[in-house]
Amino acid sequence: MKAAAVAALIAAAIAAFGAGTANAEATWRLEQPAPPAGAAFKVPLGTPDDMQFYAPNEGLLSVEGNATVPAGLFFWNGRDWHQLSTVCGAAGEASRIAWAGPDDFWVITEPSEPRSGAGLGLCHFEDGVIVGSYSTPFQSPEPFRPMDAAACDGPEDCWFGGQLGETPDSGAFHLHWNGSTLSVVYSPQDHAIASMTVDQGEIYESVQLAPGDSYGNESVTNPPLLHTIVTSDPSEVFHPKFPIEASCVDFCSTLPTYGTNASNQAVAPDTLAGLSLSSDWSPSGEGPAAPQLWAVAGPGTTRPPVGQAVAHSVALRYSNEEWTQIVPNLASFEPGEDPTGVAADPGEQAAWVTIRSEDGAAHADLLSATGGGEKWSVSERVALGPQQGVGAHGEAGPIACPSAHECWLATNKGWLFHLTDGAPLASDGDPFFDGQDGVIAYRPPDDGVPEVLPDEAPEDDSLANQQPPPPVVAPTTSTTPGVGEAVKKALVSDVRTRLLKGDVLELTFTLSGRAYVQLVASRHGSVVVRSRRETLRKGVHALKVALNPKRWPTKLDLHATAA
């Protein structure tokens, strides 16, 4: 009886604790990934470049690594972070991540050989492998320019923007992916691109003004800082968002309001840093009913001309088809609080803003509204590290809030802080990101020429004599050597398949030499799953892929190329 009573009390206490945790107020805490193999303690990940989420339990972090942690990408599955890739990751503060779908994303990175440099290459990840690597050699007639921003409105509309072209008045360099082709596009505005994001299916970009820019027919004292990218009209792709509005062209007030300084000097627009953009709209459908887009910037490094002043910090918010300048019109940061990044707080009239500091702590302010949005203020200021009792762990780097009361901040040293109310998240069970097949370490060589694994493999009849057993539409055995026209028959032999646990397909085969190998399963010409592309030695090997019963493959292709 006593044991039963104690057990009941323990169960009640656990239940009460769980309920209280789920409804507790969200707080910031240090949450570092498990230590890498060979390390006794948790370690910093190295300088982070970017952090983006497709869903609350599906996030990516690009880090530059250090002596213990390799550079690359980390994946958040709702329960923990683990290294996803050691290639195509951080590139010296120029790496940018753009989600195109739940299993589809792009990364701005360094180019493949023979050219090197941050932001000069692209990697396309899909279904757990790198399906495309893009860069240009020195002698290219149209070489890639350094890129600093990326955004996708679905798998067939991705944009990457960066610095100005090499010729005067050439506009900002862009790359556009339409689902099959990567094209070079230059914007008509002669300003470099600072940031990109997607809000309600529309791609926004901010520009960085600089001395020497050409303004054309733009206002020199108040040029548009935000553009929308429209692809419906090929003759006019880029449209400035400010001051042009469909409902009021001539009488809309331009944003931002630069104002004057204490000496009544006009502000030089190019002294404002490029606006950092963030939206809480989610392509996964889990976002708020009334999305919000934020644009935040502090003073830049440009010195103003004689007689003009340096720009003050600016925070703009777009919601319900209306732009509002929050800072400095309705709220203000304290002197010396210069914003560097922003993350919209989903479902709230609020945003977390990272603040530049030099004290070794990660500072962030919460800009929020009260009184139905009539009053705005900095409602919370945090110094992550000291306030959690763990000491200084670096200054604020990338920040993201994938859902209400759920945010992440990475410091410039590679430590992660998590804002959470303790409610557990569902673990993302996507086999492409579970890490069970190892870390992605292979990037297809491109030598400056785009290379994409085709969605539809070449026709071949090498397995036509095999009868597929129901319900698997795949060969059960095969003594035919390699599959596919590009594979030498002597390279692959003794190909066999079997089902494991009902929906896991295992394909075994023998290699006569070292080769790059990948299994591709397709359904009526459309790829449904790929194995991780691997470099395998001579001998017997097995590849496994998890199948979706709702998208059962009708064809298997084993791609093997001698290494």
Image (cartoon, rainbow, N blue to C red):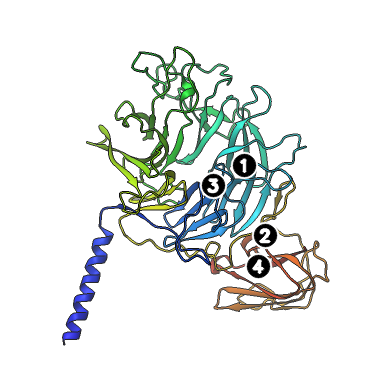
Q: CA distance from mark 3 to mark 2?
A: 29 Å
Which of the two labelled residues, at mark 2 and mark 4, occupies the earlier sequence position? 2
Q: CA distance from mark 1 to mark 4?
A: 41 Å
Q: Dot 4 surroundings within 10 Å: few (below 14), some, or many (20 or more)?
A: some
Tell me the SS state at disc 3. strand
Front position in the image: 463 or 311: 311
Q: Identify the image quadrant of the C terminus.
A: bottom right
- The image's mark for residue 118 is 1
Disc 4 residue type (three-letter): Thr
Q: Which residue is mark 2?
A: 525
Tell me the SS state at disc 2. loop
Disc 1 residue type (three-letter): Ala
- Relative height, residue 502 to residue 69 (above, below): below
Q: Which residue is mark 4?
A: 554
Q: How many marks?
A: 4
Please state the horizontal and vertical placement of residue 324, each as a whole percent of the image: 35, 29
Q: Which residue is mark 3?
A: 97
